[in-house]
Image (cartoon, grey):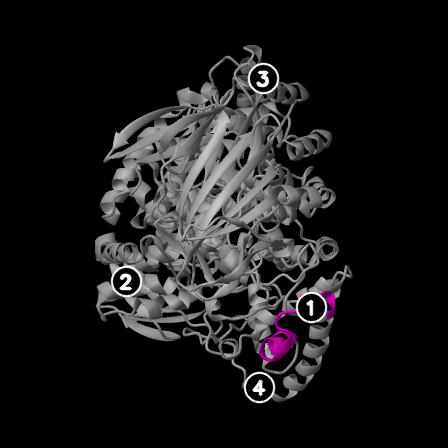
């Protein structure tokens, strides 16, 4: 999945995401052990809700207090493990060992009470005598005694539900699904029936599977011998989205049975499951569209299924539809047959073995263009009025598909690949096998209104989703703790493929900016290891974050450079071949790489230090003649810089790279593996300067303890001695170190003094990012005069460059992108005469009633300037509502609308986007991001989030990437103790699931660090600027 692509390319606009500092860790972290962890995340065995479930089943007294006691986050599970050994908070483990077998099949409420009493009594005794003997690993208590299953919650009908865990039991596995669906775009409901062929692994009387919000009317079980289907009892347990189909007789090991379930439901109002979309056709008439978004946990709300990624099966899908509409699914269509008047049924070919979250279908009026490549038909679909914008996507998809097949040495295995633009879509895109769904702005390219940046975005998202056809679809992570195997890989391949096929897009510079952003989050206490234990739906949703995507990808980038590209590619081929149509864990990837390195290098040992530890290393370099001393420690922000000490237990195996004044091209990059706390490197000769982490290909920051002056001078004298990415990384490092208190802010400002000679996008973008962070904090703090001095400094450094920009789409893609960045920044901050020029162009455009063609790269700057006046704003809104305006243009309009200083308009905009009628709800997080950066808007945005929290979490799901963004943006500008308290108490007043979100903790960290940064630097800035 591509979570929120509009945030990815346009860093300069929305750059102030998090602040720069960290406090000391205070949470026991599973991954703290330097490199080899006794407990890997997925080796933990826990059934944390068992005791609670039992009591919940007894009555309607909800166990809120118990729930508060329950440790839900991955980190706390680690802590819980520590605590258990001290004999505290261990009810559940005690239950697990000691529940009385005689109560194993209770069927009445009285029996439940009996169980409770018995269990509590036995627990108390066993807690004292037996607990220390328990080791909580795979081979621990759980395997010795399976009595955990004896403690059950109650189903909706009051009967005992025969399963208590969130994860499904392993005793039954699905082999094949026959799914028939009949969506009705008039009543906005759907009816369905599913036949699931299952195989029995362990004798059982029950088949437990997922179902959410479905009105099940009938269930039957048939044995493979073909006996008549027998209606059977089914039980529902909505808290875990589970149902249990109760067999009339024991289901025998090795036998296959067919479960048949009939049900109905409403098309969803959210962006999850099988959901409805309202849009306007070319005649401005309202039309309906239905599509699916199942990842991670919503397949269960479209059909009952075994909704965990490792339960792969084949799918035969049939869709009944209005004969005027079109249906698409993962596989090509096999046949269409009439059903009743005006209704026909499409049958699709049986799918390959795949996970439920990849199943997809679409019902709509769509048009397409297609092209065949290597035996697969690639098609791009859109609503009819957008068919003229699908050409670029088709060309790009075909090129990328061909590239991946060559790179992986595995053909794309389906006969077709559809890419569909969905008119309202929460994320950027979704990689459903054979049927990739996109937001319209990430697939449709309009030659008149799509900018250089839009082109980059569309290319990147297609590259990402196509990579998933192998990483994710062919080989899937076994469980969501290793989501990075899907998302980190797809992100890595996205940038790698773009560099190979579309080098003119310079996508590597975008990736670099994303890595800087991920590192900022990773230096906060709220960070987590890339591979982290997860169980609840919120925890799973929260895995879709910068660590799974960007950190995962940048670790692969680092590994590729260390192993060399041929070894890395060979390792990937082995991994894909060894696990195709199956599931994998992180270790499987390292084992595949080790097959290639053949003992010369232990990839697993090296990479575990990066995957299982949160944060990243700070490498301090001290040079004395030819001798270079290097030392590593964890990069983190201390609240008391004078007492700065790093956590000594962290140790990474860092593949260091460096270039020097006598050897400064990529062909003579030097490498050294730092797998100790410190080491000494001897150079063949003395050098003028040395730069580590070449092109920022490694996930670490370097501090040149006594050498910053040398690098500052180098940039001043001859900045092109270093690559643009190296220059950007120096800017990022020195500002990060200044925030840490390891280097002075003065030196950081001195380093960027060379910028008036700079012409590359990456260093300019990074410098603007750092200065904007400071500007925004000062502005919100009421330090307007000082903020103006920051802006003056930017003007001094980049003013000439801004003046040189033309209001056209001329030049290379890189030049065009730099122009977009500089002019959008200048117009937003009223620098030079940007606003005057932009306003003049806007007025001409308005006079032409929007028919005059505008240069696409500077369109946003023009609209932003135009939206400052009330007339301009109203006109933009009118144009936005017109169905004839391309989506690429609309997205620029929406950003401009959100940049107004009129608070009533801002409130109206947020409210209407939440309602989704005039402004699409998919735009809301973007609107909140823009509003929360401005002085008139930042308090409004937070108020809006508070007032609409329930609606927001209902629409976008707690923990989703959208909610993460909304929380992060709407609190990012706070730098006072009052705001800190307010944000804390707001989330504390909500459910425990809300207050325990990682993104809430991240926001609180950020505010604390903003406060600290201000206290530390305000006086210094007075002197400095
Ligand atoms: Zn993805």
Q: Helix or strand or loop: what does disc 4 sit on?
A: helix
Q: Which residue is mark 4?
A: 132
Q: Position of residue 347 (x, y in %)?
A: 40, 33
User: Mark 3 Cα within 10 Å, few/some/many (few <14, many 20+)?
Assistant: few
Q: Which mark is residue 214?
A: none
Instruction: Tell me the CA gap for discs 3 and 4.
Output: 69 Å
Compared to residue 683, the image places residue 98 above or below, namely: below
Q: Helix or strand or loop: what does disc 2 sit on?
A: helix
Q: Residue 869 lies in what quarter of the image?
A: top right
Front position in the image: 669 or 40 = 40
**Which of disc 4 and disc 3 is earlier in sequence?**
4
The boundaries of the magenta stretch are 90-110
Q: Which mark is residue 69?
A: 1
Q: Is mark 3 within 8 Å of ligand 1?
A: no
Instruction: Tell me the CA gap for discs 2 and 4.
Output: 39 Å
Marks 3 and 2 close (CB-CB < 8 Å): no
Q: Is residue 151 visible?
A: yes
Q: Position of residue 748 (x, y in %)?
A: 48, 54
Q: Which mark is residue 285?
A: 3
Front position in the image: 292 or 171 = 171
**Which of disc 1 and disc 3 is earlier in sequence?**
1
Marks 4 and 1 close (CB-CB < 8 Å): no
Q: Which mark is residue 593?
A: 2
Instruction: Tell me the CA gap for discs 3 and 1.
Output: 52 Å
Front position in the image: 199 or 684 = 199
Marks 1 and 2 close (CB-CB < 8 Å): no
- Looking at the rendered image, the disc whose residue lies closer to the viewer, 3 or 2, is 3
**Which of disc 2 and disc 3 is earlier in sequence?**
3
Instruction: Tell me the CA gap for discs 1 and 2.
Output: 42 Å
């Amino acid at each position: 999945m591509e979570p929120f692509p509009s945030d990815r390319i346009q860093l300069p606009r929305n750059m102030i995401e998090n602040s720069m500092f960290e406090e000391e860790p205070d949470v026991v972290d599973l991954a703290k052990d330097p490199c080899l962890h006794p407990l890997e995340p997925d080796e933990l065995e826990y059934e944390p809700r068992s005791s609670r479930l039992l009591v919940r089943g007894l009555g309607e007294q909800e166990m809120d207090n118990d729930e508060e006691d329950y440790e839900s986050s991955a980190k706390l599970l680690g802590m819980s493990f520590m605590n258990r050994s001290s004999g505290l908070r261990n009810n559940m483990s005690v239950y697990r060992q000691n529940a009385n077998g005689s109560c194993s099949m209770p069927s009445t409420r009285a029996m439940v009470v009996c169980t409770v009493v018995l269990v509590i009594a036995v627990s108390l005794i066993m807690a004292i005598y037996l607990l220390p003997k328990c080791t909580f690993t795979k081979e621990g208590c759980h395997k010795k005694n399976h009595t955990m299953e004896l403690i059950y919650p109650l189903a909706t009908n009051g009967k005992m539900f025969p399963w208590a865990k969130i994860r499904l039991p392993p005793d039954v596995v699905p082999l094949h699904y026959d799914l028939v669906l009949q969506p009705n775009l008039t009543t906005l409901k759907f009816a369905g029936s599913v036949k699931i062929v299952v195989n029995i692994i362990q004798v059982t009387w029950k088949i437990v599977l997922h179902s959410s919000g479905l009105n099940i009317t009938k269930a039957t079980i048939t044995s493979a011998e073909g006996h008549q289907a027998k209606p059977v009892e089914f039980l529902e347990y909505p808290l875990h989205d589970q149902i249990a189909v109760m067999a009339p007789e024991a289901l025998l090991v090795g036998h296959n049975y067919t479960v048949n379930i009939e049900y109905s439901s409403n098309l969803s109002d959210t962006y999850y499951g099988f959901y409805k979309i309202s849009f306007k056709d070319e005649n401005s008439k309202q039309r309906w569209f239905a599509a699916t978004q199942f990842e991670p946990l919503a397949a269960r709300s479209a059909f009952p299924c075994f909704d965990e990624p490792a339960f792969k099966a084949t799918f035969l899908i049939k869709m009944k539809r209005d004969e005027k509409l079109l249906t698409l699914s993962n596989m090509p269509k096999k046949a269409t047959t009439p059903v009743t008047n005006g209704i026909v049924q499409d049958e699709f070919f049986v799918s390959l073995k795949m996970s439920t979250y990849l199943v997809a279908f679409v019902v709509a009026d769509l048009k397409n263009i297609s092209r065949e490549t290597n035996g697969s038909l690639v098609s791009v679909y859109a609503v009819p009025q957008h068919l003229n914008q699908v050409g670029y996507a088709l060309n790009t998809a075909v090129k990328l598909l061909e590239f991946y097949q060559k790179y992986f040495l595995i053909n794309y295995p389906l006969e077709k690949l559809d890419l569909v633009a969905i008119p309202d879509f929460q994320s950027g895109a979704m990689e459903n096998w054979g049927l990739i769904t996109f937001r319209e702005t990430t697939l449709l390219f309009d030659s008149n209104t799509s900018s250089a940046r839009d082109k980059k975005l569309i290319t990147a998202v297609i590259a990402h989703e196509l990579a998933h056809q192998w990483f994710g679809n062919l080989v899937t992570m076994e469980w969501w703790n290793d989501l990075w195997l899907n998302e980190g890989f797809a992100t890595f391949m996205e940038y790698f493929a773009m560099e190979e096929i579309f080098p003119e897009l310079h996508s590597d510079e975008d990736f670099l900016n994303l890595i800087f952003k991920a590192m900022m989050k990773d230096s906060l206490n709220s960070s987590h290891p890339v591979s982290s234990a997860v169980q609840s739906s919120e925890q799973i949703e929260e895995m879709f974050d910068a660590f799974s995507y960007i950190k995962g990808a940048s670790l692969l980038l680092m590994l590729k450079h260390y192993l060399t590209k041929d070894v890395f590619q060979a390792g990937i081929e082995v991994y894909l071949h060894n696990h195709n149509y199956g599931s994998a864990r992180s270790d499987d990837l390292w084992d595949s790489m080790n097959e290639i390195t053949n003992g010369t290098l232990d990839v697993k040992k090296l990479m575990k230090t990066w995957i299982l530890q949160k944060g990243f290393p700070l490498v301090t370099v001290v040079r004395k003649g030819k001798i270079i001393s290097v030392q590593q420690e964890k990069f983190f922000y201390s609240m008391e810089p004078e007492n700065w000490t790093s956590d000594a237990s962290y140790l990474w195996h860092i593949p260091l790279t460096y270039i020097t004044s006598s050897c400064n091209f990529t062909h003579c990059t030097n490498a050294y593996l730092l797998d100790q706390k410190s080491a000494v490197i001897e150079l063949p000769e003395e050098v003028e300067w040395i730069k580590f982490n070449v092109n920022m290909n490694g996930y670490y920051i370097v501090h040149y303890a006594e050498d910053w002056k040398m690098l500052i001078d180098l940039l001043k004298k001859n900045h092109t001695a270093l690559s643009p990415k190296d220059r950007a990384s120096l800017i990022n490092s020195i500002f990060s170190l200044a925030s840490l208190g390891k280097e002075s802010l003065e030196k950081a400002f001195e380093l960027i003094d060379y910028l008036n000679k700079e012409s590359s996008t990456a260093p300019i973008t990074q410098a603007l990012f750092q200065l904007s962070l400071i500007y925004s904090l000062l502005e919100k703090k009421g330090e307007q005069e000082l903020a103006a001095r920051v802006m003056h400094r930017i003007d001094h450094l980049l003013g000439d460059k801004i003046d040189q920009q033309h209001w056209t789409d001329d030049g290379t893609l890189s030049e065009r992108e730099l122009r977009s960045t500089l002019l959008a920044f200048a117009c937003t901050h009223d620098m030079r005469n940007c606003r005057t020029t932009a306003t003049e162009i806007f007025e001409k455009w308005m006079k032409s009633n929007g028919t005059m063609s505008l240069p696409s790269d500077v369109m946003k700057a023009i609209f932003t300037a135009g939206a400052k006046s009330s007339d301009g704003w109203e006109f933009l809104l009118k144009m936005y509502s017109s169905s004839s305006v391309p989506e690429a243009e609309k997205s620029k309009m929406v950003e401009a609308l959100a940049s107004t200083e009129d608070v009533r308009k801002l409130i109206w905009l947020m409210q209407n986007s939440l309602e989704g009628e005039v402004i699409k709800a998919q735009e809301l997080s973007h609107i909140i991001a823009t509003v929360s950066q401005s002085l008139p808007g930042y308090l409004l945005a937070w108020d809006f989030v508070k007032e609409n929290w329930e609606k927001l979490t209902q629409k976008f799901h707690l923990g989703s990437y959208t909610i993460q963004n909304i929380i992060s943006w709407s609190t990012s500008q706070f730098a006072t103790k009052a705001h800190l308290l307010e944000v804390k108490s707001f989330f504390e007043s909500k459910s425990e699931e809300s207050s325990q979100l990682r993104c809430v903790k991240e926001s609180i960290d950020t505010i604390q660090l903003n406060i600290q940064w201000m206290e530390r630097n305000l006086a210094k800035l007075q002197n400095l600027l």
